[in-house]
Image (cartoon, rainbow, N blue to C red):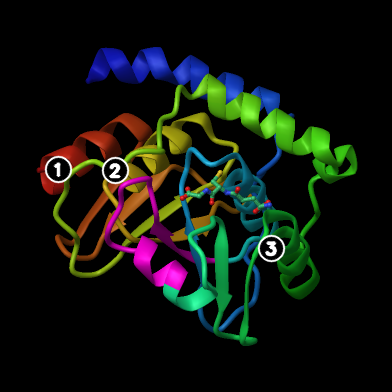
């Protein structure tokens, strides 16, 4: 696993370069409840929404929906009428909708933060996000067997962090629900908190090892 981590890290870095650094750290937004996002890491449209999450500083409960996933995918169809990702539910305002661009615009309008300049590229923004997904070789797309944590995990990192991407890919494939708190400027991340085992783990490689040891079947 160690070797594969160090092989994938440069590719994850390449994905961040292709996104021109979008998904940077931002000050925490004011909110009562975390927003709920159904998405999967390998989806290029979900990345556009995640970059907005990172740059608006909103805490979101990620319900990972990899292809073949059974834990959260059915809820999206039940809530919105179709299996399309990303899908957002904001219980603070009652807003719930699909479409990555609409979600990004809504988050910044409602919670602030600097919008990524990538949006001015229009359709090219999505094409670059698809290239970034190619650089990740479909990681974070397909379900892997796992046990579900009783309480959601907590993860702190910026979207553009290449180490955090490798962790989020595993969280997604294993359908592990987590509260994602985007990193603030200068914060030491990535950090995983597991309230089920009272554990705090720092660093991409250590977090992935912990997830495999604790939740992989
Ligand atoms: N226009 C939508 C496109 C979303 C989309 O096509 N998402 C794909 C994943 S990348 C999807 O939901 N595919 C169905 C599936 O995975 O079952 C957006 O920007 O959010």
* Disc 1 to disc 3, C-alpha distance: 31 Å
* Disc 2 to disc 3, C-alpha distance: 24 Å
Q: What residue lies at 69% left-to-right and 24% top-to-bottom? A: 18
Reading the image, the residue beneath label 3 is 103
- Indicate whether 208 appears above or below 183: above
Q: What residue lies at 38% left-to-right and 47% top-to-bottom? A: 66
Q: Position of residue 46 (x, y in %)?
A: 58, 49
Q: Give the mark, 1 or 3, whose residue is nearer the N terminus.
A: 3
Based on the displayed image, in which of its 4 quarters is residue 77 positioned? bottom left
> Tag 1's secondary structure?
loop
Q: Give the mark, 2 or 3, whose residue is nearer the N terminus.
A: 3
Q: Is residue 106 left or right of residue 177?
A: right
Q: Is 73 colored magenta in this rendering?
A: yes
Relative to the observer, which residue lies in front, 22 or 192? Answer: 22
Asked if disc 1 is less than 8 Å from ligand 1, the answer is no
Reading the image, the residue beneath label 2 is 143
Relative to the observer, which residue lies in front, 134 or 81? Answer: 81
Task: Name the mark nearer the viewer: 2 or 3.
Answer: 2
Which of the labelled discs sits on residue 216, or is there none? 1
Mark 2: give few (<14), some (14-19) or many (20+) Cα within 10 Å: many
Q: Which range is magenta?
A: 59-77
* Disc 1 to disc 2, C-alpha distance: 11 Å
Q: Quadrant of the C terminus?
A: top left
Asked if disc 3 is less than 8 Å from ligand 1, the answer is yes
> Tag 2's secondary structure?
loop
Q: Position of residue 7 (x, y in %)?
A: 38, 12
- Indicate whether 136 appears above or below 60: above
Task: Name the mark nearer the viewer: 1 or 2.
Answer: 2
């Amino acid at each position: 696993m160690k070797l594969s981590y160090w092989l994938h890290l440069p590719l994850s870095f390449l994905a961040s370069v292709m996104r021109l650094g979008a998904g940077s750290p931002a000050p925490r937004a004011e909110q009562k409840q975390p927003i709920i996002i159904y998405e999967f890491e390998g989806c290029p449209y979900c990345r556009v929404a995640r970059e907005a999450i990172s740059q608006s500083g909103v805490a979101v409960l990620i319900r990972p929906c990899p292809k073949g996933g059974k834990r959260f995918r059915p809820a999206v169809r039940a809530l919105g009428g179709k299996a399309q990702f990303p899908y957002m539910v904001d219980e603070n305002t009652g807003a719930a909708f699909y479409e990555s661009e609409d979600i990004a615009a809504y988050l910044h309008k409602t919670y602030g933060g600097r919008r990524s300049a990538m949006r001015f590229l229009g359709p090219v923004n999505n094409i670059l996000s698809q290239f970034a997904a190619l650089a990740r070789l479909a990681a974070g797309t397909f379900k892997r067997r796992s046990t579900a944590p009783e309480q959601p995990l907590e993860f702190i990192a910026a979207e553009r962090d290449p180490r955090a991407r490798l962790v989020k890919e595993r969280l997604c494939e294993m359908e592990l629900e987590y509260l994602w708190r985007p990193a603030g400027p200068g914060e030491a991340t990535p950090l995983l908190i597991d309230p089920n085992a009272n554990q705090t783990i720092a660093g991409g490689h250590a977090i992935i090892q912990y997830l495999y040891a604790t939740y992989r079947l």
